[in-house]
Image (cartoon, coloured by chain):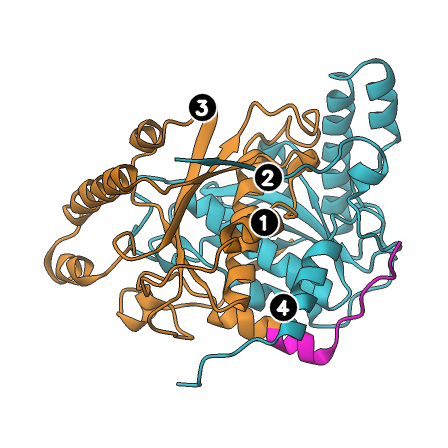
Chain colours: A orange, B cyan
């Protein structure tokens, strides 16, 4: 067995910089990623923690223009519906936000979670079944930081109808949609979230209580 | 604005090592963490991605011995119940596994998600409400990797009854339990998941389909 790593102060400082500069990217260059990049990142994502070592993440790489257009239409409809929930200044601000990079992102994929997987033999998830979804989310986050370390940005699209997405992507009925993701080179780099720069919301210190 | 970071090959290689050596730790040294460590890690966790910049994570640091004992009792009951779902060799193996470090971990906290938060003004979560939970999960994973970079291990305990946990920890009714976490110095370091070393399950390549 290799000896355990001892991380340096430089590495730790780089990690904090990485976490601070990770962004939800919605503005992409159309430049394709180097061949094999997504596959390598998906391999890395699959060493994320998973409940009972169930590895319940399921990746759907979306290449067909027809399906991409259907995803974009689904987003547009859901986003138009979301806009109707706001009024006045807030609605005007919402309408100005760019919330997805579906038109430009060269690489797009969906992540699902399989609650029916027998991998892991059910360990750890009898009391809290959602840990299957949480495992898939940690695979997403693993991919997100690994991509950013290579200068590749990712955006999470959640303004979608899950039932419609399963039809568009023709996925097994036992898979649950976690999210749809755009991957590519960001056309702008920022250390501040878009929604903070656009004055939609600002970051606050964590809520911590003691018991 | 500071200029965007340019990560080196050394850093990227360190990041992969970190992801490979992150573990779900269940065996802890009783040594306390340096003062302020948890608070610092919670601050870092709160720069995780969150839907609509809602930052819905809620941290409950559990210090009271009485409450810790109640959490441990809850785990023991749920774990005994889980054991009854297995039989034969599998049951014997399950009974031998150490699935939580509740007796030794010097630092323990629960993470909840607040679906009622108005932060973020509902952006991004009208179609997929669970993105609130997923945001809290990404805060957990952020803390997990940041802790590991400092040589601190974390274990996720999910074999718990969420309703009972809310009573034990006396949390607001609108908070949903995401998980309970043990933090401290690991008494063993491994590059292989415990469940793989103990022959419960083995890791597989990711399931990837193309559409």
Query: Is A203 left, or right, of B58 in this rendering?
Result: left
Decide: is A8 above or below B151.
below
Residue appearing at x 14%, y 46% in the figure: A84
* Circle 3 residue: A172
Q: CA distance from mark 1 to mark 3?
A: 21 Å
Dot 4 falls on a residue whose secondary structure is helix
- Nearest the viewer among A22 and A40 is A40
Q: CA distance from mark 4 to mark 1?
A: 14 Å
Residue appearing at x 35%, y 45% in the figure: A158
* Circle 1 residue: A45
Q: CA distance from mark 4 to mark 2?
A: 21 Å
Which quadrant would residue B183 be assigned to in this image?
bottom right
**Neighbourhood count class around disc 2 (C-alpha, 10 Å): few under 14, some 14–19, many 20 upward:** some
Task: Please give the range of residues in magenta.
Answer: A1-14
Dot 3 falls on a residue whose secondary structure is loop
Residue B107 seen from this side: no
Chain of the residue displaying label 1: A
Query: Is B158 left, or right, of B178 in this rendering?
Result: right
Chain of the residue displaying label 4: B
Label ID, residue A173:
none
* Circle 4 residue: B12
Q: CA distance from mark 2 to mark 1?
A: 8 Å
Which quadrant would residue B152 be assigned to in this image?
bottom right
- Tag 3 and tag 4, C-beta contact below 8 Å: no
Label ID, residue B206:
2
Dot 1 falls on a residue whose secondary structure is helix
């Amino acid at each position: 067995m290799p000896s355990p790593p001892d991380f340096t102060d430089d590495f730790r400082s780089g990690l904090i910089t990485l976490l601070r500069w990770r962004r939800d990217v919605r503005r992409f260059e159309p430049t394709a990623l180097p061949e094999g990049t997504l596959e390598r990142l998906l391999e890395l994502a699959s060493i994320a923690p998973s409940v009972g070592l169930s590895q319940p993440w399921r990746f759907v790489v979306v290449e067909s223009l027809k399906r991409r257009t259907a995803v974009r239409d689904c987003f547009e409809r859901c986003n138009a519906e979301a806009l109707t929930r706001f009024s006045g200044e807030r609605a005007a601000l919402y309408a100005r936000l760019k919330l997805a990079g579906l038109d430009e992102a060269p690489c797009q994929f969906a992540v699902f979670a399989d609650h029916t997987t027998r991998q892991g033999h059910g360990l750890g998830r009898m009391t809290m079944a959602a840990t299957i979804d949480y495992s898939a989310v940690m695979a997403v986050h693993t991919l997100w930081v690994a991509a950013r370390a290579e200068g590749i940005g990712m955006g999470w699209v959640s303004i979608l109808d899950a039932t419609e997405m399963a039809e568009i992507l023709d996925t097994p009925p036992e898979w649950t949609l976690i999210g749809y993701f755009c991957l590519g080179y960001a056309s702008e780099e920022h250390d501040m979230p878009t929604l903070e720069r656009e004055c939609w919301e600002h970051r606050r210190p964590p809520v911590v209580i003691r018991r």
